[in-house]
C-alpha cells in the first residue's frame, strides 16, 4: 500500500503533457485571485471604464462627419473635441489604475503561489525526491511562476481588455448597422475555429519548452552544487558541453513554440482584416446608393477596426495564455501531490517525560526506486532508554534505512516501529522527530550565520542557549576566532569550515535540540585522526543521559557501545558487545580484522 502511494507520487511529479488541452488549469489560480477581491474588482472596473471610453470615440467621429466641417458648425465641432479630450483623460487614468492593479496582482499571486508550492515541497517525503529531479522542481518553482506572473500582470489583463473591446465593438456595430454587423458575425467562425485549433498546438509546444528548460536547469543545478567535484575531475568542458546540448534543446523547443505562435498571430490578423475589408466594401456600396450616411459608415469602420485590432490582440496574447495554462498545470501537479508519509487523523500524544525507547518488530521495507529489492527483511531489535547501540555492516546492507524509518522519512511495508511506546505512524511527524537529534555524515549547513546554523530546527533559541550548546560541542573556541564570531556568515554548505568544524556545528545543533534520542550517522567517518578525536570527545558528552543509535564503518568508534547490531543484506545477522562478537566470529570479526589490520572495510 505504501509502495503504491510512493509510486503514484513519482508518476504525478514526472507527468508530461496531458490530455487536457483547454485553459482549464488556469482555474487553479482562482483561489489566489479571490484572496485579493478588492484589487481584482478595482482592476475590472478600471478595465471596463477604459473600454467604454474607447468605444465612445467612434460616436463622436460619426456626429462630426455628419454635422459637416463648416464655420456655422464650429461650436458643435469644438464641443465634440472637448468631449473627446475628456474621454482621453478618462482613458489615461483608467489605464494607469488598471496597470497598477494587475501588476500588483501578478506580483502578489506569484508570491503566494511560490510560498504554497514551497510549503508543499517541504512536506513531501524523500520518496517523492527519489523519483523527481530537484532541478525540475526548481524550474517549476521559478520559471513557471514567473510565466504566471507575466500572464496575471499583463497578458490576462490584455486578453480580458481585448475580449471586452471585441464584444463591445461588435455590439456597437449592430447598433450602427445590423446588416453589416450580421455579415461580421457570420465571418467570426472562420476566424475563431483556426485560432482554437492552433492555440491547442501552442499549449502543447509550450509544455514541451518548459520541460526542456527544466532539464537544462537540472543539469546546471546538480553540477554547480558539486563545483569542487567537477573541477577536481577537470570535467568543466564536458559538463559545459552537456549543458550546452540541454540549452540548445530548450531553445529548439522554444523556437518551435515561437514559430507556432507567430503563425497563429499572422493567420488570425489576416483572417480578421480580410473579413473586415470585404464587409466594408459592401457597406461602401450602401453609402454610394444613399442607404447609409458617411458618418454612419465611418462609425462602423472605427468599430470594425476596434474589433479587428482587439481580436488580433486577443490572438496574440492567446498563445501566452496557453503557455501560462501549461505552467499552471505543472504547478497544480505539485500542489496536488500528497506525501505518502503524513500525520494521522487522530494522532496519539507523547507524555511530557522524555524516555528514549526504540522498538523494531519484524520490519520489512523496500525503497520506491527499487521496489523489488528489500532494504530490510524481518528486522527486530530494541534499544532501551539511555542505551548506546551501534549498527554496523557493509555498504548497502541497510544501516541507513534503519534511521530513515525511525525518522519516518518512509513507512515500513510490514512490521511495526515504535518510539516510547507509540507507533511512529500514530503520532504527528513533528512530535516524533522532536524526540530525536540527528548528526549525519554529510552535514547540512546553510549560507547563514554560525548562530543561525546552530539554531536551525530550534525556534526561539537565545544567543545564550546557542553559545552554551557550542561550548558543549567543543565548538566555541574556533567560533570565537572567526572574524565575526557567531555572526560570521558561512558559505554555501558551510564550505568555509573544515570537516571537523562542520561536524561540531552539527553536534552543537543536536545539543541545542535536547532530544532524548540521539542518531549518529557516520559522524566521524570523513575526519582525520585529530579532528576525529575532538569530535568524538564532543559526541561522548552529547551521549550522556540519552538513548544513542550509531551507524559506523569505523569499528574503533563503537567498541564501547552497550550492544552492536550487525546488519547483513537487510537482516540482523549478529548482536552483542564488541568482545563477544569478536569471540563469536562471523561477519563482525571479518570486518574488525580488516580494519584493525589497516585494510579498508568493504
Image (spheres, grey):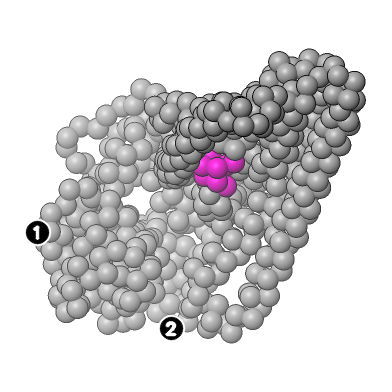
Instruction: Point out residue 316 in the picture as x, y percentages from the top left corner.
Output: 70, 43
Q: Earlier in the sequence, mark 2 or mark 1?
A: 1
The front one of 444 and 359 is 444
Instruction: Tell me if residue 154 is in the magenta stretch.
Output: yes
Residue 326 lies, with reference to residue 284, above or below; the image says below
Can you tell which mark lies on residue 464?
1
Looking at the rendered image, the quarter that the N terminus falls into is top right
Rendered image quadrant of residue 221 = bottom right
Q: Is residue 44 visible?
A: no
Please tell me which residue is depicted at 39% across the width and 24% down the height of the picture. 345
**Label 1 SS:** helix
The front one of 458 and 564 is 458
Residue positioned most to the left? 464
Instruction: Tell me if residue 331 is in the magenta stretch.
Output: no
For mark 2, does the 10 Å Cα neighbourhood hold few (<14), some (14 to 19), or many (20 or more) residues?
few
Q: Dot 2 corresponds to which residue?
A: 598
Please tell me which residue is depicted at 22% across the width and 48% down the height of the picture. 459
Instruction: Point out residue 595 in the picture as x, y percentages from the top left corner.
Output: 43, 77
Please state the extent of the stretch shown in magenta in the rendering: 147-155
SS assignment for the magenta stretch, majority: helix
In the picture provided, is 224 more to the left or to the right than 259?
A: left
Amino acid at each position: 500500500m505504501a509502495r503504491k502511494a510512493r509510486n503514484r507520487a513519482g508518476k504525478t511529479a514526472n507527468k508530461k503533457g496531458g490530455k487536457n488541452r483547454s485553459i482549464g488549469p488556469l482555474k487553479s489560480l482562482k483561489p489566489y485571485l479571490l484572496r485579493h477581491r478588492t484589487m481584482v474588482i478595482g482592476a475590472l472596473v478600471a478595465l471596463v471604464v477604459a473600454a467604454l471610453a474607447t468605444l465612445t470615440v467612434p460616436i463622436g467621429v460619426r456626429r462630426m462627419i455628419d454635422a459637416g466641417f463648416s464655420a456655422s458648425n464650429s461650436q458643435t465641432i469644438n464641443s465634440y473635441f472637448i468631449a473627446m479630450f475628456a474621454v482621453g483623460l478618462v482613458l489615461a487614468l483608467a489605464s494607469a489604475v488598471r496597470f497598477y492593479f494587475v501588476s500588483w496582482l501578478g506580483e502578489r499571486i506569484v508570491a503566494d503561489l511560490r510560498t504554497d508550492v514551497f510549503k508543499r515541497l517541504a512536506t513531501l517525503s524523500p520518496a517523492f525526491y527519489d523519483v523527481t529531479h530537484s532541478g525540475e522542481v526548481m524550474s517549476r518553482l521559478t520559471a513557471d511562476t514567473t510565466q504566471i506572473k507575466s500572464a496575471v500582470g499583463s497578458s490576462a489583463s490584455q486578453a480580458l481588455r481585448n475580449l471586452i473591446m471585441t464584444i463591445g465593438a461588435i455590439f456597437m456595430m449592430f447598433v450602427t448597422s445590423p446588416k453589416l454587423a450580421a455579415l461580421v458575425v457570420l465571418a467570426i467562425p472562420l476566424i475563431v475555429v483556426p485560432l482554437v485549433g492552433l492555440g491547442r498546438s501552442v499549449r502543447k509546444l509550450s509544455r514541451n519548452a518548459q520541460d526542456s528548460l527544466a532539464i537544462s536547469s537540472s543539469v546546471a543545478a546538480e553540477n554547480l552544487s558539486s563545483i569542487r567535484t567537477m573541477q577536481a575531475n577537470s570535467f568543466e568542458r564536458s559538463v559545459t558541453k552537456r549543458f550546452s546540448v540541454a540549452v540548445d534543446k530548450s531553445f529548439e523547443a522554444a523556437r518551435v513554440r515561437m514559430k507556432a505562435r507567430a503563425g497563429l498571430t499572422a493567420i488570425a490578423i489576416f483572417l480578421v482584416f480580410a473579413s473586415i475589408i470585404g464587409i466594408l466594401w459592401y457597406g461602401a456600396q450602401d453609402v454610394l446608393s444613399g442607404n447609409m450616411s458617411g458618418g454612419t459608415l465611418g462609425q462602423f469602420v472605427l468599430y470594425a477596426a476596434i474589433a479587428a485590432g482587439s481580436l488580433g490582440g486577443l490572438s496574440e496574447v492567446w498563445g501566452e495564455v496557453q503557455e501560462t495554462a501549461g505552467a499552471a498545470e505543472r504547478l497544480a501537479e505539485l500542489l496536488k501531490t500528497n506525501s505518502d508519509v503524513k500525520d494521522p487523523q487522530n494522532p496519539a500524544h507523547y507524555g511530557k517525560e522524555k524516555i528514549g525507547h526504540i522498538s523494531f518488530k519484524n520490519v520489512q521495507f523496500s525503497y520506491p526506486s527499487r521496489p523489488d529489492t528489500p532494504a530490510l527483511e524481518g528486522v527486530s531489535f530494541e534499544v532501551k532508554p539511555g542505551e548506546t547501540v551501534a549498527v554496523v555492516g557493509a555498504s548497502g546492507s541497510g544501516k541507513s534505512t534503519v534511521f530513515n524509518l525511525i525518522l519516518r522519512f518512509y513507512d515500513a511495508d510490514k512490521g511495526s516501529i515504535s518510539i516510547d511506546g507509540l507507533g511512529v505512524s500514530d503520532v504527528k511527524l513533528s512530535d516524533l522527530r522532536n524526540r530525536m537529534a540527528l548528526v549525519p555524515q554529510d552535514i547540512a549547513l546553510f549560507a547563514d550565520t554560525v548562530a543561525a546554523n546552530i539554531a536551525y530546527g530550534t525556534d526561539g533559541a537565545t544567543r545564550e542557549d546557542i553559545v552554551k550548546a557550542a561550548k558543549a560541542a567543543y565548538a566555541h573556541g574556533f567560533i570565537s576566532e572567526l572574524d565575526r564570531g557567531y555572526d560570521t556568515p558561512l558559505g554555501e554548505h558551510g564550505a568555509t569550515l573544515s570537516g571537523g568544524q562542520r561536524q561540531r556545528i552539527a553536534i552543537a545543533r543536536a545539543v541545542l535540540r535536547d532530544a532524548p534520542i540521539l542518531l549518529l550517522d557516520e559522524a566521524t567517518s570523513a575526519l582525520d585522526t585529530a579532528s576525529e578525536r575532538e569530535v568524538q570527545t564532543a559526541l561522548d558528552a552529547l551521549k550522556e543521559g540519552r538513548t544513542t543509535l550509531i551507524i559506523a564503518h569505523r569499528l574503533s568508534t563503537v567498541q564501547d557501545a552497550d550492544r552492536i547490531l550487525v546488519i547483513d543484506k537487510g537482516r540482523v545477522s549478529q548482536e552483542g558487545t564488541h568482545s563477544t562478537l569478536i569471540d563469536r566470529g562471523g561477519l563482525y570479526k571479518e570486518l574488525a580484522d580488516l580494519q584493525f589490520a589497516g585494510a579498508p572495510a568493504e
